[in-house]
């Protein structure tokens, strides 16, 4: 929905695995969006731990505000 412009962004729940995210990450990137962790860093794949923390997916202009609004969600 972000890639086709229906929404500006969303929160991705914690514990998503690499294989849950890789295709969506690529589609989002090609559409001008991004998928970042709450530290504002892009995802890193093929790590020993394939689970991810809470993530933000958004159109690039909306990403900084979504990350800022998402601070504190890490423990939930």
Image: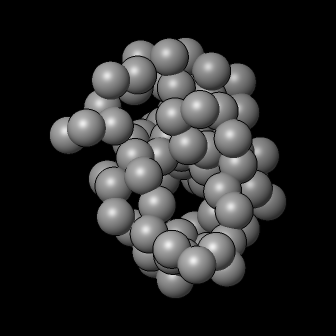
Residue at 52 percent across and 83 percent down: it is: 19
Between residue 46 and residue 69, name the one nearer to us: 46
| Residue 34 visible in image | no
Q: Residue furthest front?
A: 48
Judging from the image, the colouring scheme is: one colour
Residue drawn at x 67%, y 79% as measured from the top left: 46
Q: Which of 7/57 is in front?
A: 57
- Find residue 33 and report its horizontal and vertical position in percent: 69, 45
Which part of the image, by quadrant, shows the C terminus? top left
Q: Position of residue 30 (x, y in %)?
A: 79, 60
* Quarter of image, res 74: top left
Q: How many marks?
A: 0
Give the percent coordinates (x, y) of residue 69: 41, 17
Q: Position of residue 42 (x, y in %)?
A: 70, 48
**Residue 8 vertical position relative to residue 37 in the rendered view, above or below:** above
Vertical arrangement, residue 33 with respect to residue 47, above or below? above
Compared with residue 1, is residue 6 higher up or lower down, i.e. above or below? above
Q: Quadrant of residue 61?
A: top right
Residue 22 appears in the rendering: yes
- In the drawing, does residue 45 fall left or right of residue 56? right
Which residue is at 51% across, 74% downward?
Answer: 49
Residue at the (75%, 56%) spot, across then down:
29
């Amino acid at each position: 929905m972000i890639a086709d412009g229906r929404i500006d962004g969303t929160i991705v729940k914690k514990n998503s695995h690499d294989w849950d995210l890789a295709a969506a990450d690529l589609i989002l990137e090609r559409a001008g969006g991004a998928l970042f962790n709450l530290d504002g860093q892009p995802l890193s794949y093929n790590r020993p731990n394939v689970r991810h923390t809470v993530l933000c997916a958004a159109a690039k202009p909306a990403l900084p505000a979504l990350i800022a609004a998402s601070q504190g969600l890490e423990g939930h």
